Image: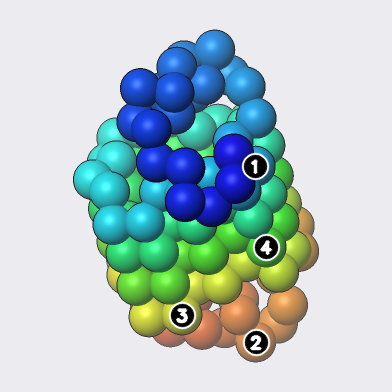
Amino acid sequence: MENGNRNLRVILKKIYNRESLARVDLRNLYLSYMDFSGLDLRRANFEGCHLSYGRMDRSDLTDARFTEAILIKASFKEANLTGANFRSAVVAGADFSEVRGLDGQLRKYLKSKGATGL
């Protein structure tokens, strides 16, 4: 799903069917409580997205963008976050237990913003 494709019916069907959402554009959508666990979300754009209480456990979030996203109490357990961008994201209470791909500087930044499991 190339950036720019924002057909929500197609996106929700892919989530329901547990299909790849690589390169999906979810900017500024309210998706709190959604379960993205185990999905291919490489290069997904979650910029400004509301994902509080969402689940992305075991997902591949390589190069995903979470800039200015609201991620309060979201779960990223065992996710691959290589190259992910969390600039200005709200991560209070978000669980990053056993994630892969975070460098030391990003771990420190997320922890300073209230993330757990780091």
Name the residue at the front extreme: 4
Name the residue rendered at 65%, 30% in the picture.
20
Q: Nearer the viewer, residue 85 or 57?
A: 85
Q: Quadrant of residue 48?
A: bottom left
Q: Are marks 2 and 3 in contact (CB under 8 Å)?
A: no
Q: Quadrant of residue 101?
A: bottom right
Q: Nearer the viewer, residue 50 or 102?
A: 50
Q: Earlier in the sequence, mark 1 or mark 3?
A: 1
Q: Which residue is mark 2?
A: 105
Figure label count: 4
Type of amino acid at the residue the image marks with label 4 = Asp
At mark 2, the secondary structure is helix
Question: How dense is the environment of label 1, judged by Cα within 10 Å: few (below 14), some, or many (20 and up)?
Answer: many
Residue 104 position in % (x across, y down):
70, 82
Q: Which residue is mark 4?
A: 63
At mark 3, the secondary structure is loop
Q: Which residue is mark 1?
A: 22
Residue 25 position in % (x across, y down):
47, 50
Judge depth for marks 1 and 4 and give the one in front.
Answer: 1
Type of amino acid at the residue the image marks with label 3 = Arg
Q: Earlier in the sequence, mark 2 or mark 3?
A: 3
Name the residue rendered at 59%, 46% in the picture.
2
- Gap in angstroms between the C-alphas marked 1 and 3: 20 Å
Numbered label attached to residue 87 = 3
